[in-house]
Image: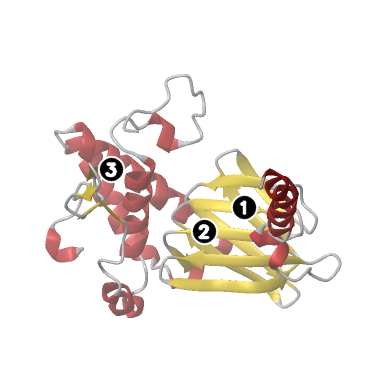
Amino acid sequence: MSFLARTLKPATALARVSRLSARFYASEAAAAPAAGKLVVNFALPHAAVLKGTEVNQVDMSAVSGDLGILADHVPTIEQLKPGVIDIIADSGSTKYFVSGGFAIMNPNSVLNINAIEAFKLEDIDPQAVAANLAESQRLASSAKDEATKEAAAIEIELYEAIQTALSAKSK
Amino acid sequence: MSSAPETSKHSANLYVQIANYSYLQYSSIAARALRRVAKTELQAEIAKREGLAVKYSKWDSGKAGVFAAIPIVETRPKADN
């Protein structure tokens, strides 16, 4: 009986090891992009903006600073500020404004971007931005409770970032 | 969760300066603010996914409590939201 247990034990241990080695990171499952290209997955809770799209460069505004990502960038995780994500492909550049989120650069030139809300820059109404900025500024100075003031400050930060992005675009 | 790290000197990031909000609340407020300024023709589409947000519940001895949306402050009158 004890002989049987001794011979069976290494076999099950081996089986466990081989099962583990069959696992891989999600990033490794994606197909490797062409040389010099970056694969972008850009997801919102309600839509996939980009899925496995090959691009040349992605510029973004992160908490640690503005950065441009090319193929073979070092793996990193960046927290995004409310700001522009510029997706530069052979066909031209597409600018999205995101409300904040995370960008995860994987070791194999796959970039995953997650945000709660994103719109193309041309889908944003400049008049609505100006009106909402004024309203949030009024609220920031007139609100009595700290929570409302801080919510207004978050909105002001976002609306000012949109205005900067829109004025940079029109130049 | 509700208080910002006191040691942070990251003035570039508004989130860490804000004491009253968690990251989920901060990002929900930012997302709501961005939704407001989308062009009028997109607003119908946006209204359709209302309620598609994170909900949380406090678990106590293996049982879920009431599921509620992340509480965020109203900064506009209900009508024009």
Q: Quadrant of residue A146?
A: top left
- Label 3: few (<14), some or many (≥20) within 10 Å? many
Q: Mark 2 and 3 residues: CB-CB less than 8 Å, in contact?
A: no
Q: Are marks 3 and 1 on the same chain?
A: yes
Could you say whether the residue bearing mark 1 is in a helix, strand or loop? strand
Asked if marks 3 and 1 touch (Cβ < 8 Å), the reply is no
Q: Which of these two is toward me, B61 or B43? A: B61
The disc numbered 1 marks a residue on which chain? A
Q: Secondary structure at mark 3?
A: helix
Per the model, the C-alpha gap separating discs 2 and 3 is 22 Å
- The tag on residue A104 is 1
Report crowding for label 1: few under 14, some 14 to 19, many 20 or more residues within 10 A (C-alpha): some
Which quadrant holds the C terminus of chain A?
bottom right
Task: Classify 10 Å Cα crowding around label 2: few (below 14), some (14-19), many (20 and above).
Answer: many
**Residue A13 on image: x %, y %:** 70, 49
Residue type highlighted by circle 1 = Ile
Q: Where residue A66 sits: x, y (%)?
A: 63, 45
Earlier sequence position, callout 2 versus callout 3: 2
State whether residue A130 appears in this view: no
Find disc 2 in the rendering and name its residue: A114
User: How far separated are the C-alphas under marks 3 and 1?
Assistant: 27 Å
